[in-house]
């Protein structure tokens, strides 16, 4: 099978989603013939910020981009020039690893094959109320600004995506969970599959597991309001009123104003919270593995890698009972779920938490090879369904 893959690698950003794309693209070419094309965002970053060498290095490392496309990237100085050099080719199927409509358009310029999108987040929202619940978080002025901007983008993207579908330019979807499909309503417009397993633990993480836990908790994620950033000090204030236990916060703030406001809030409430900065890999695992639990009051997930990695390290999780948490971790006893926005309930659960991580659940997520095999099978099944 010959597959066109238009992929967003992040390049200048860190996230579990971009890492997933790298893991998939590092393995999929072993099972099928794959031609990898970087996303419009990656190309813009490379051309506009002098990072062409960085993009070429990523593609060379994956060794699955045609020589013609590599020459096109080297010889072009803009996205427009790159696109003007493209020509149609024969593929069995095309998959866009991005939730941006511009990459669907890019893929369609290259092939007329059945074309699908792999979703890790929703490209737009079916209901404004869902968007409000997720985005209207943090300091009121910024929360309102963020919500209004996201609302405009969502409505604009919805028109574009539905047009792509009606024109026959987008034919199916695969997703890490049903959440991006339900939140956008794409489950009503496209045939789709959710491969299982859809994610895997980082290689080598299990060797950092600790049976003996220490008396502290952790909160690690992208440090944004949608992930419960400004609820954390309030929850921990209630915890500290009963017990003087420390919470270590790890991650990268995407907005410097959030960092200032968060640290000021911690000082004002006089809570036992310490920010350790951004940590990854071994440095992160050594802290999380010793924690009594992970606090994760997030409103914004499709498949939480924070939760998965915590479980992989035998550290239970205290989270909100969101749709995503119930779909992926609903049966896992190591994830204690409290009604969304119930600050008092989270604090009380933190004080009495005594959960154990289920070994059987974690074992399902030990292999990226299994993830890639499941994903390829889903792609093939939907392609055959479309062409039958």
Image (spheres, rainbow, N blue to C red):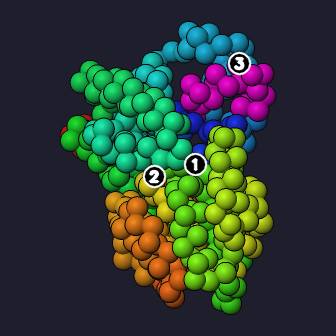
Q: Is residue 116 above or below residue 230?
A: above
- Nearest the eye: 64 or 281: 281
For marks 1 and 3 on the same chain, the one whose residue lies earlier in the sequence: 3
Asked whether the viewer can see residue 175, the reply is yes
In magenta stretch: residue 195: no
- Nearest the eye: 243 or 289: 243
Asked whether the residues under the numbered discs 2 and 1 touch, taking CB atoms below 8 Å apart as contact, a structural biologist would say: yes
Magenta stretch? 35-56
Can you tell which mark lies on residue 224? Answer: 1
Instruction: Give the foreground label among 2 and 3.
Output: 2
Coordinates of residue 50 in the picture (x, y in percent): 78, 22
For marks 2 and 3 on the same chain, the one whose residue lies earlier in the sequence: 3
Circle 2 Cα neighbour tier, 10 Å, few/some/many (<14 / 14–19 / ≥20): many
Can you tell which mark lies on residue 300? Answer: 2
The residue under label 3 is 48
Which residue occupies 37% across, 48% down? 133
**In the rendered view, does 359 fall on the left or right side of 170?**
right
Instruction: Give the foreground label among 1 and 3.
Output: 1
Circle 1 Cα neighbour tier, 10 Å, few/some/many (<14 / 14–19 / ≥20): many
Which residue occupies 66% across, 68% down? 271
Cα separation between marks 2 and 3: 31 Å
Coordinates of residue 215 in the picture (x, y in percent): 68, 84
Cα separation between marks 2 and 1: 10 Å
Q: How many marks?
A: 3
Secondary structure of the residue carrying numbered label 3:
helix
Which residue occupies 58% across, 11% down? 80
Secondary structure of the residue carrying numbered label 2:
loop
Q: Quadrant of residue 189 in the image? A: top left
Coordinates of residue 240 in the picture (x, y in percent): 61, 77
For marks 2 and 1 on the same chain, the one whose residue lies earlier in the sequence: 1
- Nearest the eye: 313 or 352: 352
């Amino acid at each position: 099978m010959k597959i066109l893959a238009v992929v967003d690698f992040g390049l200048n950003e860190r996230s579990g989603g971009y890492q997933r794309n790298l893991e998939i693209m590092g393995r999929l070419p072993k099972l099928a013939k794959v031609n990898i094309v970087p996303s419009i965002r990656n190309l813009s970053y490379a051309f506009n910020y002098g990072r062409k060498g960085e993009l070429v290095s990523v593609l060379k490392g994956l060794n699955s981009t045609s020589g013609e496309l590599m020459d096109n990237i080297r010889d072009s100085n803009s996205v427009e020039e790159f696109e003007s050099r493209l020509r149609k080719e024969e593929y069995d199927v095309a998959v866009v690893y991005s939730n941006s409509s511009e990459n669907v358009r890019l893929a369609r310029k290259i092939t007329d094959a059945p074309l699908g999108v792999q979703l890790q987040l929703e490209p737009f929202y079916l209901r404004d109320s869902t968007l409000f619940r997720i985005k209207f978080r943090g300091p009121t002025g910024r929360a309102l600004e963020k919500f209004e901007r996201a609302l405009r983008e969502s409505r604009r993207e919805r028109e574009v995506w539905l047009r792509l579908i009606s024109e026959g330019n987008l034919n199916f979807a695969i997703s890490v969970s049903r959440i991006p499909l339900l939140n956008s309503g794409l489950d009503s417009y496209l045939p789709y599959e959710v491969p299982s397993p859809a994610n895997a633990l980082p290689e080598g993480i299990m060797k950092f597991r600790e049976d003996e836990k220490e008396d502290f908790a952790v909160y690690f994620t992208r440090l944004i309001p949608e992930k419960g950033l400004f609820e954390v000090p309030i929850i921990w204030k209630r915890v500290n009123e009963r017990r003087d236990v420390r919470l270590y916060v790890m991650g990268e703030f995407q907005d410097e104003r959030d960092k200032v406001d968060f640290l000021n809030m911690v000082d004002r409430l006089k809570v036992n919270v310490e920010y350790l900065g951004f940590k990854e890999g071994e440095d992160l695992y050594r802290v999380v593995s010793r924690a009594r639990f992970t606090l994760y009051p997030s409103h914004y997930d499709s498949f939480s890698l924070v939760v998965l990695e915590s479980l992989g390290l035998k550290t239970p999780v205290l989270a909100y009972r969101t749709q995503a948490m119930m779909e992926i971790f609903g049966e896992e006893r190591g994830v204690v779920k409290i009604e969304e926005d119930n600050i008092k309930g989270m604090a009380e659960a933190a004080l009495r938490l005594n959960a154990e991580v289920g070994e059987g659940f974690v074992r399902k997520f030990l292999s990226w090879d299994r993830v890639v095999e499941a994903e390829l099978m889903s792609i093939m099944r939907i392609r055959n369904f479309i062409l039958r």
